[in-house]
Image (tube, grey):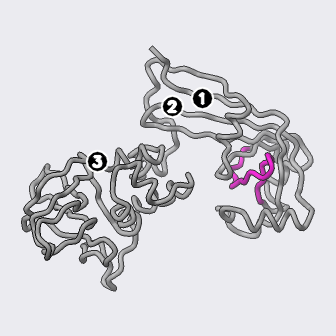
């Protein structure tokens, strides 16, 4: 076994109930890279001298990782769901790899490996990473995927607070998925989820002329965005009310299409842009009461 500074040392669990550990090699005792190594463990952030046993292997920094059971027969590895979620959340928050690694107290090399290959970091490393990304371990692991939010227990002492307009605009962020409340052709109320963008304080989404969201055009409608953290039993919601209009100016349509973060998840031909400029913007947040 040979290693370089910055490589990742992984010790697989060989005993039931024993956690897998990983850490960054921060010190070499021999010039040829042979053991022992000084390792900063991702679960404790402590540095210890390690004499690797048969259950240990090296993931070299900047080199192809050793073959892993989850690596394809072609020799390339696809990122696991965890890595995809970490990378997507990091990009969504506009964080660089180095800055995220610094916040999570792990090496950039290890974070890059985590995003690009199937991996199983320790619970402590996941907690630090979730905290660095402003999310939860359950969310990074995909817990609750496919289930409606809000199935956690209510807080013992919740506090419901109204949000000012500036906070509401901040929570709307730049894009995401929101819900449009419209009246269908048969006169019944309906709520439809749409991918949206924020452009010059206006909410914009794409749809098809014959779709249900298109019924909103020319009327005053409600648009809602929310986020729920089941693990901490807290969340927020923002409600925007305003008139919906079709974007017809060719330059504006081209700009919206070119800068859209994603095509509509519903797929199909959805080239009609609808814009809502809120005349009312309100929100609420549930947090734990200060005691």
**Viewer-nearest residue: 4 or 79:** 4
Q: Which residue is mark 1?
A: 285
Q: Residue at x 66, y 46 (%)?
A: 173
- What number of labels is visible? 3
Whether residue 211 is situated above or below residue 161 in the rendered picture:
below
The residue that disc 3 covers is 123
Q: Which quadrant of the figure contains the N terminus? A: bottom left
Q: Nearer the viewer, residue 40 or 259?
A: 40
The secondary element bearing badge 2 is classed as strand
Q: CA distance from mark 2 to mark 3?
A: 22 Å
Q: Residue at x 24, y 77 (%)?
A: 67
Q: CA distance from mark 1 to mark 3?
A: 29 Å
Q: Residues within 10 Å of mark 1 (few under 14, many from 20)?
A: some
Which residue is at 26% across, 52% downward? 42
In the image, residue 274 lies in the stretch drawn in magenta? no
- Residue that label 2 marks: 234
Query: Could you classify mark 3 by the number of other residues whose Cα lies within 10 Å: few (under 14), some (14-19), or many (20 or more)?
Result: some
**Residues in magenta, as a range:** 191-206
Locate residue 133 relative to residue 44 in the image: left or right: right
The kind of secondary structure element at disc 1 is strand
| Secondary structure of residue under mark 3 | helix
Horizontal and vertical percent position of residue 76? 35, 80
Q: In the rendered structure, does residue 195 fall within the stretch colored magenta?
A: yes
> Disc 1, disc 2: CB below 8 Å?
yes
Front: mark 2 or 3: 3
x then y, percent, for residue 190: 75, 44
Tell me which numbered mark, 1 or 3, is placed earlier along the sequence: 3
Instruction: Return the x and y of residue 140 as percentages of the image width and height.
Output: 42, 51
Q: Earlier in the sequence, mark 2 or mark 3?
A: 3
């Amino acid at each position: 076994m040979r290693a370089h500074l910055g490589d990742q040392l992984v010790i697989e669990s060989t005993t039931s109930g024993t956690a897998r550990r990983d850490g960054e090699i921060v010190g070499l005792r021999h010039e040829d890279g042979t053991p022992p190594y000084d390792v900063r463990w991702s679960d404790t952030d402590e540095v210890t001298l390690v004499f690797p046993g048969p259950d240990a292997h090296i993931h070299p920094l900047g080199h192809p990782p050793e073959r892993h059971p989850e690596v394809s027969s072609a020799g390339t590895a696809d990122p696991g769901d965890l890595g995809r979620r970490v990378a997507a959340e990091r990009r969504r928050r506009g964080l660089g790899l180095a800055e995220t690694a610094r916040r999570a107290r792990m090496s950039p090399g290890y974070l890059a490996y985590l995003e690009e290959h199937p991996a199983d970091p320790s619970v402590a490393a996941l907690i630090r990473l979730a905290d660095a990304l402003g999310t939860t371990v359950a969310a990074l692991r995909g817990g609750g995927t496919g289930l409606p939010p809000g199935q956690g227990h209510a807080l013992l002492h919740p506090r419901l607070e109204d949000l000012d307009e500036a906070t509401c605009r901040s929570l709307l962020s730049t894009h995401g998925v929101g819900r449009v409340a419209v009246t269908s052709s048969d006169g019944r109320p309906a709520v439809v989820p749409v991918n949206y963008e924020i452009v010059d304080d206006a909410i914009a989404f794409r749809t098809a002329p014959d779709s249900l969201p298109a019924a909103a055009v020319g009327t005053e409608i409600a648009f809602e965005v929310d986020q729920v953290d089941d693990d901490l039993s807290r969340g927020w919601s923002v409600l925007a009310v305003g008139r919906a209009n079709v974007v017809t100016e060719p330059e504006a349509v081209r700009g919206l299409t070119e800068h859209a973060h994603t095509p509509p998840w519903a797929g199909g031909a959805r080239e009609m842009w609808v814009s809502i400029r809120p005349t009312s913007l309100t929100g609420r947040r549930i947090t734990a009461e200060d005691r």
